[in-house]
Image (cartoon, rainbow, N blue to C red):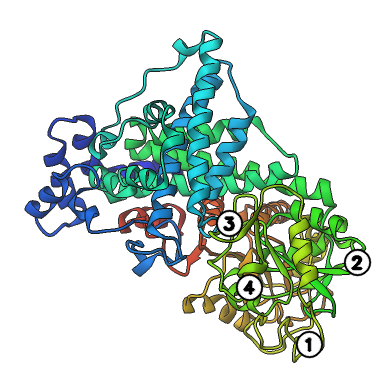
Amino acid sequence: MSRRYLLNKALGAFARTSFTTGVQHVGGRVQATALAATQVLGRASMFSTFREMSSFGAGAEAAQKKMHCYQCEQTANGTGCTVMGNCGKTPEVAGLQDLLIFSLKGLGSLAHHARAAGIEDPEVNTFINQATFSTLTNVNFDDTRFQQYISESVHLHARLAAKLQAANKASQIPTVPSVPWLLSSGMPHPIVWNQQTSAQIDNMLIPDLIEVSKQTGIVARQEALGKTLAGLQEMVMYGLKGLCAYAAHAEALGARDPAVYAFVQEALCFLSSPASAEVPNVMDMAMKLGKCNFRVMQMLSEAHSSTFGHPTPTEVSLTPKPGKCILVSGHDMHDLEQLLKQTEGQGINVYTHGEMLPAHGYPGLKKYPHLAGHYGGAWYRQKMDFSYFPGSILITTNCVLEPMASYKKNLFTTNETGLSGVSHIPTKDFSDVIKRALELPGFNQSNMPRSAESSSGGRGAVGGTGNGLKKVVTVGFGHHAVLGAAGQVVDAVKTGKLSHIFLVGGCDGHEPQRTYYSRLAQVLPKDTMLLTLGCGKFRVFDQDFGTLPGTQLPRLLDMGQCNDAYSALVVATELAKAFKTDVNSLPLSLDLSWFEQKAVAVLLTLLHLGVRNIRLGPRLPAFLTADAVGVLVKTFNL
């Protein structure tokens, strides 16, 4: 029997009582779901559960909450943010994001069926990915932008429907299904809501949309389906958010794959269909998502290399230079390239921040002499980093936090990012960013670092956490560079010089539990290597690990951004071939530090590929119940 069959069987066994009766038969919905909730979720009493459920919509339980969001690792108490997001998200923004995803499920469903009828709209394809990306953790906090996204979603839906009508293919669109958990929330199917709202969407104010959004959150589904099934549906949705983020990065570089657009819309359609009320179906979709995300990461990796060249090992200065300056944070290499072109000859030094650090390894970017170095640490330190940076700051993608007054006027967002009261650049013309940089003092004798060992000398953007901090770090160990030394790695293993490889990938964060990754690195034996990717690298990136004894191989190799998990998989696969074994039999350990939805997409990709023994932390996702986690552990040894 296959691993997927065992997974589906096990999940279905414990979840079946939580949804079978309540979903298949609308009549008796309240009583059946209340009974299941008592059996599976252990509610205090049948009476209290019935009372909560009988309120319909979000119910009495939801009425006591301003929001419910548990899509990221920092969610309150490890269960969910209900008053204010720990990320800084307001209940209003949380509601607008819920409503946007609801509308996108309608647009995605229509686009999925339209494609089957031979009708496709490229603008719809791009918009769905970008709008889904905008709801990722720490991307957009601007309620006005979400109002615009919702309006555009409804208008694109109407346009696509009109195309079908004009082509005499509207009759080929299947009948809108009846979805019981939508009935319990008081909302029509997302397709129907988009259609009904198209005439008045332009007159709906933000408070109107927020009021509607109260019926589109997770709570009603938790009540109707049980927390296990609803959480598994969210796992697919959150993985889809990560996939759409990577796809948007790739499209910015001109890389598109029709199959990716088709899958995204298929998944949105699935999540708003009765089929998603079956656990095996949800898990099958999760594995399909992992497969598609592998293709997206490959597409993004190839787009980076074809545009900027293959990364090569490159030393990057952590010491600022005197002069005017701009800091670029996020992930978007295309934006960095455009800014470097626009600042040529203007006497402005450009620095990377956060996950833009790997940019220095690309030949097509490091050729610009005014790409001066790297400033700061991981995303969560940005309030300190940005406060001490004496130039303008461009945020290209996540992660962004609500700014402090000390640097708010110096901050600019672009692409899907957004902050209320912060200037947004909707095009690739960064003139305003450059103008602000020229107005600000830049680095000079009065604000230069006190020490060359960190990019702020204790004033803000401090580097790693250990001793022996370096003035430079080396990046650019993508799979092309690492495979170039594969023979040395294989020889080191065979001769006993290399006993084990540890891959620490994913997101960093402020929680004290995340010191696990730096402590792990500090106690590793000298005959081991450490590979990093994502912003988890900032726990160790500026420490000196030296070389593997008896070889010229650096013990610390940074493989790039979080999406460069693709490079790690390529290296692991090639090493497995060299040793005539599989990835799970290699002397390789994977420690995945998850924070937001990109990490969910990467995890699903690893599980799809059959990778086992992954260590996931620092806390488990709140959207997965103990039952769901238990089965994942049993099936994948997670």
Q: Would you say 96 lies left or right of 119 here?
A: left
Callout 1: SS:
loop
Q: Which residue carries the number 1 mark?
A: 452
| Residue under the image location 71 percent in, 79 percent down | 542
Are the residues tagged 1 and 3 within 8 Å (C-beta)?
Answer: no
Q: Which residue carries the number 4 mark?
A: 407
Are the residues tagged 2 and 1 within 8 Å (C-beta)?
Answer: no
Q: Identify the mark nearer the N-term, 1 or 3.
A: 1
Real-space CA distance between mark 2 and mark 3, rounded to the nearest whole angstrom: 43 Å
Q: Which residue carries the number 2 mark?
A: 369
Real-space CA distance between mark 4 and mark 3, rounded to the nearest whole angstrom: 47 Å
Real-space CA distance between mark 2 and mark 4, rounded to the nearest whole angstrom: 26 Å
1 or 3: mark nearer the eye: 1
Label 2 sits on what residue type? Pro
Would you say residue 203 is visible in this rendering? yes
Callout 3: SS:
helix
4 or 1: mark nearer the eye: 4
Q: Identify the mark nearer the N-term, 2 or 3.
A: 2
Q: Which residue carries the number 3 mark?
A: 584
Are the residues tagged 4 and 1 within 8 Å (C-beta)?
Answer: no
Quadrant into which the N terminus falls: top left
Label 1 sits on what residue type? Ala
Q: Identify the mark nearer the N-term, 2 or 4.
A: 2
Label 4 sits on what residue type? Tyr
